[in-house]
Amino acid sequence: MQSLICEKSLYILENMPVLIDALDENGNIILWNKEAERVTGYSKEEIINNPDAFKLLYPDDTYRSYVLSLVPELENNFRNLETTITCKDGSQKVISWSNVSSLYPIEGLSLWAVGVDITKSKKAEENLKNITTELLSIVKAFPDLYFKIDKDTTILDFRTYNRDDLYVSPDKIIGNKIIDMLPMDVALLYKSAIDYTLSTKKIKSIEYSLSFDSSKQYFEARIVALNENQVIAVVRNITEKKLIEIKNLEQQKRYKSFFDYSPDMLLEADIYSGYIFVANPTFFKITKIDKNELEEFTIYDLFNLNSASEL
């Protein structure tokens, strides 16, 4: 009866869709199932009772010594132990081993382990890690703040390489709501933009200013829908650009004020056609021309000048 149980157990282990190996008291491999053959390329005849089997699977002396030292240290009871096996064709595969033989003994096998080939998932994990590193490098190259925000305006995560643009300290950002961190008018602007983006799936841009200790800073935020309940806010400091715009606007106002109230006739016209675009009140007062009639005249008609084509 014991022999029959052992036979059935071995049959199951032999045909399981995972790698199964087993060792005897001397450390020799005495079980190498079909999946182990398929994954590694080594047949039973090459592995079972071969004293050099581990040299085939782990040809590097240092790494082999490290792997063989792990099992006794873990007392033959471990899960998800990753080792890199060298296959018969020279390729390498990452195997996740679990040894539960002390908990679930099988007659005739003193030590056995289950292995899963996780090479593809490890490569995918590494690729994802590389992509994440590349994205972080891209983020680092731009002077922007990136916020992952829930629909209730809770900050879920953020990334920035210019912390001088943060209105509050970094440790007070994640887990807190915008309404608790920014002035009410700015927080409501964000809430409205988030609601709009989540409902329409369109990008929404907003501009606002924040008063820091020593200056007033201007920001532009672009809100992008991430999923049904979350958005990404890409925030850029536009203070330099905004100050230039403000300066230009002030200059335009001063120019307009000078233009409108100058005691001299002032006008803007095309030098080639002579048509007048705009004129100041003094011009209309002196020439007695009605504003609605301005388009009927050119500077060459009014001032007896030669046209640009004749110059």
Image (cartoon, rainbow, N blue to C red):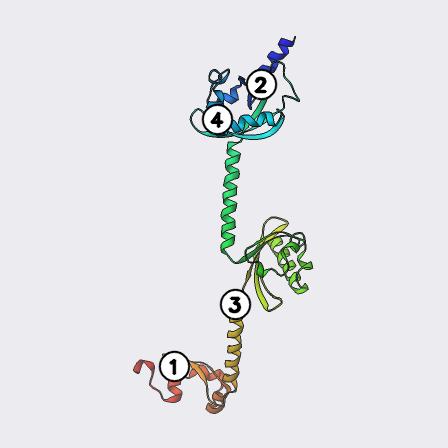
Percent of width and height locating residue 233:
58, 55
**Tag 1 residue:** 274
**Tag 4 residue:** 58
Nearer the camera: disc 4 or disc 3: 4
Q: Are marks 1 and 3 in contact (CB under 8 Å)?
A: no
**Residue at image location 64% in from the left, 62% down from the top:** 189
**Residue at image location 43% in from the left, 27% down from the top:** 90
Left or right: residue 126 versus residue 308 is right
Tell which circle, 3 or 2, labels the residue nearer the N-terminal end.
2
Compared to residue 165, the image places residue 297 above or below, namely below
Tell which circle, 1 or 3, labels the residue nearer the N-terminal end.
3
Cα distance in 3D space between marks 4 and 2: 23 Å
Nearer the camera: disc 4 or disc 1: 4
- Indicate the quadrant where residue 212 lies: bottom right
Tell which circle, 4 or 2, labels the residue nearer the N-terminal end.
2
**Tag 2 residue:** 13
Depth order, front residue of 137/292: 137
Cα distance in 3D space between marks 1 and 3: 38 Å
Nearer the camera: disc 4 or disc 2: 4
Cα distance in 3D space between marks 4 and 1: 90 Å
Q: Residue furthest left?
A: 310
Q: Are marks 2 and 1 in contact (CB under 8 Å)?
A: no
Tell which circle, 4 or 1, labels the residue nearer the N-terminal end.
4
Q: Secondary structure at mark 2?
A: helix
Tell which circle, 4 or 3, labels the residue nearer the N-terminal end.
4
